[in-house]
Amino acid sequence: MKAIIVTDQAAGTAGMQLTERPEPEAGINDVVVRVQASGFTRDELTWPPTWTDRQGGHRTPSIPGHEVAGVVTALGYGTTGLSVGQRVFGLTDWYRNGTLAEYVAVEARNLAALPGDVEFAVGASLPMPGLTAWQGLFDHGHLTAGQSVLVHGAAGVVGSMAAQLAREHGAYVIGTGRAAHRRMALDFGAQEFIDLENDVLEDVGGVDLVFDVLGGEIAKRSAGLIRAGGTLVTIAGPVQTRPVNVLTVDFVVESDRAQLGEIVRRVRDGRLRTHIGEVTTLADAVAAFNATQRINGKTIVRVRS
Ligand SMILES: NC(=O)c1ccc[n+]([C@@H]2O[C@H](COP(=O)([O-])OP(=O)(O)OC[C@H]3O[C@@H](n4cnc5c(N)ncnc54)[C@H](OP(=O)(O)O)[C@@H]3O)[C@@H](O)[C@H]2O)c1
């Protein structure tokens, strides 16, 4: 099968190559998915599981991309809950070969049914940002209606999902980003916008929850804005400060079938909009990932037309 591989961590996206790889086989509780569309997050190439297995051994050449939408073509021994021919989408294991390929083997529990009226490209754009936003706001942030939430990077891929979900949940949403992101962040549901390049973050006053995607100084300064009993949730790694009376959570997203269902239901009924920046093909994907122009939104690879 055709697949994009990486072998050299230092090379970044420049080291990606489109090549031939053996088709994967379904292990116990796996399915094989014929990939229709794939999502790739640039930072994956800095994450240890792209390069090592769970024992710390090298596992290159590895196939990046962990979001998938496609059709089940085979079931592994003992697999239940999905069937051959079913449309599915989900988030795949960080330590296994990924979705920038014509086929991928995935544990069935990491996938959910993709309704027939949701395009594969949309399906592949939802798992990472949708689940990350959902888990950050609700599982870890315990957001309730009427609370205020500061969403960093609210015009970005994850932040735009978090802003929409928080708003729908009845929270007051303050988005942040660069000056040029104001309109987009407000369109994605933020009621106020802080331009981190020109405004003073501290002017926000107190908030109940910070949803951080930026880390560093911004995360540290944001911790000081949280009311007693509030929460700082970050997806950018450990925060350098842990204020008293504030819960600080840094987490890595996990796949969850029920949550995928909640997310796609909202997309179908118009409550949630995905943030796709461009759609490319497997043949053009390496060039797209290496383009010098920064694309706002997610790059989706249409593996089959
Ligand atoms: N832990 C997890 O489970 C998990 C899950 C998903 C993603 N992540 C990580 O989360 C981060 C965000 O992912 P994403 O896909 O949402 O990225 P993204 O689409 O690039 O979103 C980040 C947004 O913040 C903006 N931004 C960055 N630096 C800024 C600054 N100094 N001031 C103002 N705005 C700034 C970006 O603008 P520009 O594009 O102009 O820079 C962009 O709009 C990445 O590091 C990703 O690897 C972690």
Image (tube, rainbow, N blue to C red):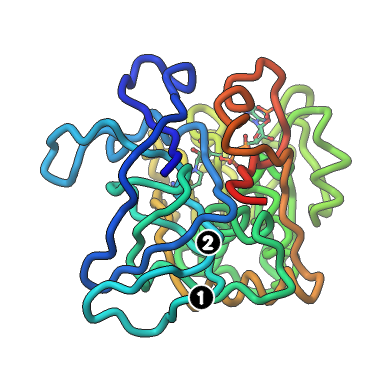
The residue positioned 57% from the left and 37% from the top of the image is 282
Q: Can residue 30 be seen?
A: yes
The residue positioned 28% from the left and 64% from the top of the image is 26
Can you identify the residue that label 1 sits on? 85
Are there few (<14), some (14-19), or many (20+) residues within 10 Å of tag 2?
Answer: many
* Residue behind label 1 places its C-beta within 8 angstroms of ligand 1: no
Q: Is residue 199 above or below residue 225?
A: above
Q: Position of residue 142 (x, y in %)?
A: 51, 69
The residue positioned 17% from the left and 32% from the top of the image is 58
- The foreground one among 220 and 16 is 16
Q: Is residue 64 above or below residue 139?
A: above
Q: Earlier in the sequence, mark 1 or mark 2?
A: 1
In this rendering, the label closer to the viewer, 1 or 2 = 1
Distance in Å between CA atoms under marks 1 and 2:
25 Å
- The foreground one among 221 and 186 is 186
Q: Is residue 136 above or below residue 30?
A: above
The residue positioned 74% from the left and 65% from the top of the image is 272
Can you identify the residue that label 2 sits on? 131
- The answer to whether residue 39 is left or right of residue 250 is right
Q: Position of residue 114 (x, y in %)?
A: 60, 72
Determine whether the residue tagged by mark 2 lies in a helix, strand or loop: helix
| Amino acid type indicated by mark 2 | Leu
Are there few (<14), some (14-19), or many (20+) residues within 10 Å of tag 1?
Answer: few
- The foreground one among 19 and 173 is 19
